[in-house]
């Protein structure tokens, strides 16, 4: 995730704009007086579900949180990014002498972890002492292929086994302490191996580099059962998913990710050929973990042990968890958080429950044929929660009904899609045998839950380096233009023939993409000193644009035309949806004049949509054949 996306994730557009413009809630939107032109009746609308704003009055502008701040304060994109990043607690990575030193240190820690992993692995496979760990693996039916694939290892029953091995190879005591491989004893000040007489599971980042270790006891009375590396400069358990390096390709292909609780479950799943399985780090799932997977698929299944799934902690969605969170960098996902995450990021999260008393590992070992069915039968979060809570209450009593409604309402309020929401309201109404309208009225009355607060200065900044961003249709278009900016001229000719305008910044909804377009479409040499953040995004797009499949150069203009028409179609459809929404709200509040005004805006965007769709038709195979026939017909006449 790039810094720009991270900022967007953390700053709520309603909250942000409210600090400049007093906003009033009107149905699902917020309204205020446009700060960009003088007006007496509010035509400035903020849409929380898309995190955008639009002025339906004289200026007709719109955009996201970046474009708002840029216009309001007259800032460049970089300046706006800097301000917003500070507010969101996101550190912008700019190469400095200091960060270069940090990078060197990171590199050294990574090498040290790779060396340690080899050391542990060697002990498991080659040493006499490793036999006990081997016996344990055999008992869990973990085969040698899995041992190799995950590079499992064994830590000696000694105080300085790893320590002296690493010292010999040039890793200082301080470095080993920083990497969490040693523990320092308070009184004596002496340090010793953190992992002793345990099965070692290397924990890797997305790129497959060892960043930490998990360790399981081999003696029944040792505690804790599982011991992980502590938080280090390499390892943040809230941002790591075990097995993702090996699962990512399969997750993409299967278009589904299954998330389990323990790393032993992942070993068994992969061994059984279910390689789209990853695990959290023994703590509750965080939004950041899910976001990493979201780049691979939009379909998540959480396979929870029966006791976790049924526990109040997993189901509770509300204030207690949130308060505890305000202090931490990453929120832990409660059921409410999951629903919000689904809505905001447009993903589908389901929960699979395992038979009581059995964890994924048991099933994968004993009855692996049951696994696909369990995953297939996963329920959407809201249904799952509704059923689980319903099971705890007597729905024949008024008290039971009201408790169920009270427990489920916060979840329903998080659902941004009105159709989906209606579906669940209906489901709930049938469950408690209460009229749907009563439930709806109740939902409308209660306050909307606050979004996740920006962490601000109190929380530690999050440093983002690994992934630089999403690569959607807008990014694809930009990458194509980068390959040959000259193709824009040919594309413009074709667009003109179709009664459309050439490609412009307005074809991009994302402010960063607008800025990048302005940069790349300017003639060579006229771009002033570019911002490092913009430059790094250009690099990212260039690199992605070269990955296959690549359109051949002579087809590029046609590709640009198709792409831009599709984007316009989407933008206009969305604009129409927004307009219809505000018009309906004007109708409902009895504002006849406003409603008429919105109608004329609806008409005009419909006309523009018509032009775009006609152009798309003309470029389709049928459209082109038709055109050809007409031309030939004319020739014949
Ligand atoms: Zn305006």
Image (tube, rainbow, N blue to C red):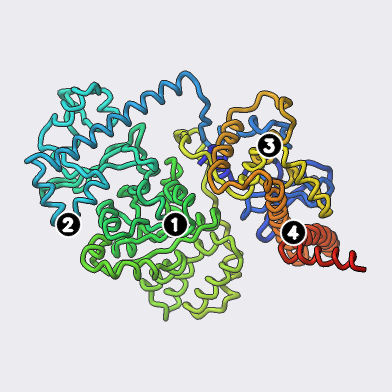
Residue that carries the numbered disc 2 in the rendered image: 140
Quick one: 57 or 268, which is closer to the camera?
268
Q: Mark number for residue 619?
A: 4
Residue at the far left in the pictured view? 128
Q: Secondary structure at mark 3?
A: helix
Q: Secondary structure at mark 1?
A: helix
Query: Would residue 407 be visible to someone looking at this image?
Result: no
**4 and 3 marks in contact (CB < 8 Å):** no
Circle 4 residues within 10 Å: few <14, some 14–19, many ≥20: some
Residue at x 38% of width, y 23% of height: 104
Does mark 4's beta carbon lie closer than 8 Å to ligand 1?
no
Q: Mark number for residue 515?
A: 3
Which one is in front in this view, the residue at disc 3 or the one at disc 1? 1
How many labels sit on residues? 4
Query: Would residue 51 be visible to someone looking at this image?
Result: yes
> Residue 353 lies in what quarter of the image?
bottom left
**Is tag 3's residue or tag 1's residue first in the polypeptide sequence?**
1
Residue at x 24% of width, y 51% of height: 146
Which one is in front in this view, the residue at disc 4 or the one at disc 2? 4
Q: CA distance from mark 1 to mark 2?
A: 29 Å
Q: Secondary structure at mark 4?
A: helix
Q: Mark number for residue 244?
A: none
Which one is in front in this view, the residue at disc 4 or the one at disc 3? 4
**Is tag 1's residue or tag 4's residue first in the polypeptide sequence?**
1
Residue 580 placed where, x, y %?
A: 74, 63
Quick one: 26 or 636, which is closer to the camera?
636
């Amino acid at each position: 995730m790039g810094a720009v996306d991270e900022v967007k994730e953390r700053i709520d557009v309603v909250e942000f704009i409210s600090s400049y413009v007093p906003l009033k809630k009107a149905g699902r939107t917020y309204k205020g007086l446009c700060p960009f032109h003088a007006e007496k009746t509010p035509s400035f609308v903020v849409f929380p579900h898309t995190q955008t704003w639009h002025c339906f009055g004289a200026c007709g502008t719109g955009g996201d949180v970046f474009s708002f701040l840029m216009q309001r304060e007259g800032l460049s994109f970089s300046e706006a990014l800097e301000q917003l990043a500070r507010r969101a607690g996101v550190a912008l990575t700019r190469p400095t002498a200091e960060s270069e030193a940090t990078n060197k240190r990171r590199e050294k820690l990574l090498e040290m972890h790779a060396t340690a992993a080899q050391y542990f692995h060697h002990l498991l496979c080659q040493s006499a002492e490793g036999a006990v760990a081997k016996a344990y693996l055999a008992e869990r039916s973990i085969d040698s292929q899995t041992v190799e694939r995950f590079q499992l290892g064994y830590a000696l029953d000694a105080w300085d086994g790893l320590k002296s091995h690493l010292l010999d190879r040039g890793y200082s005591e301080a470095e080993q302490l920083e990497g969490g491989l040693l523990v320092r004893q308070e009184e004596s000040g002496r340090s010793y191996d953190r992992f002793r007489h345990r099965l070692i599971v290397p924990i890797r980042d997305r790129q497959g580099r060892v960043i930490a270790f998990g360790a399981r006891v081999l003696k029944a009375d040792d505690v804790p059962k599982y011991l992980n590396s502590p938080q280090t400069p390499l390892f943040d358990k809230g941002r790591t998913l075990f097995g993702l390096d090996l699962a990512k390709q399969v997750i993409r292909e299967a278009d589904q990710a299954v998330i389990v609780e323990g790393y032993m479950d992942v070993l068994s799943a992969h061994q059984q050929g279910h390689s789209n399985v990853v695990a959290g780090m023994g703590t509750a799932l965080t939004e950041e973990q899910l976001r990493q997977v979201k780049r691979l698929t939009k379909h998540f299944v959480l396979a929870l042990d029966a006791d976790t799934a049924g526990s109040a902690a997993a189901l509770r969605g509300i204030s207690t968890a949130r308060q505890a969170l305000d202090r931490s960098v990453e929120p832990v996902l409660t059921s409410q958080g999951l629903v919000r995450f689904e809505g905001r990021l447009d993903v589908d999260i389901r929960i699979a429950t395992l038979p009581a008393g059995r964890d994924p590992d048991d099933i994968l070992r004993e009855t692996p044929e049951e696994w696909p069915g369990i995953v297939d039968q996963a329920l959407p979060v809201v249904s799952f929660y509704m059923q689980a809570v319903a099971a705890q209450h007597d729905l024949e009593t008024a008290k039971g009904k009201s408790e169920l409604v009270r427990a489920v309402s916060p979840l329903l309020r998080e659902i941004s899609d009105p159709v989906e929401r209606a579906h669940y309201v209906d489901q709930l109404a049938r469950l408690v045998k209460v009229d749907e309208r009563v439930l709806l009225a109740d939902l409308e009355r209660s306050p909307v839950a606050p979004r996740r607060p920006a962490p601000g200065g109190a929380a530690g900044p999050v440093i983002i380096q690994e992934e630089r961003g999403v690569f959607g249709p807008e990014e694809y278009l930009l990458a194509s233009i980068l390959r040959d900016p000259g193709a824009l001229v040919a594309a413009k000719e074709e667009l003109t023939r179709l009664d459309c305008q050439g490609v412009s910044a307005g074809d991009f909804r994302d402010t960063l993409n607008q800025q990048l377009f302005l940069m790349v479409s300017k003639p060579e040499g006229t771009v002033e000193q570019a911002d490092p953040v913009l430059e790094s995004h250009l690099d990212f797009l260039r690199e992605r644009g070269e990955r296959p499949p690549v359109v051949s150069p002579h087809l590029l203009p046609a590709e640009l035309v198709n792409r831009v028409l599709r984007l316009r179609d989407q933008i206009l459809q969305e604009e129409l949806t927004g307009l219809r929404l505000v018009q309906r709200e004007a109708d409902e509040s009895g504002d006849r004049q406003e409603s008429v005004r919105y109608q004329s805006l609806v008409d005009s965007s419909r006309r523009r949509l018509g032009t775009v769709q006609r152009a798309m038709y003309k470029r389709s195979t049928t459209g082109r054949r038709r055109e050809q026939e007409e031309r030939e017909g004319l020739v014949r006449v």
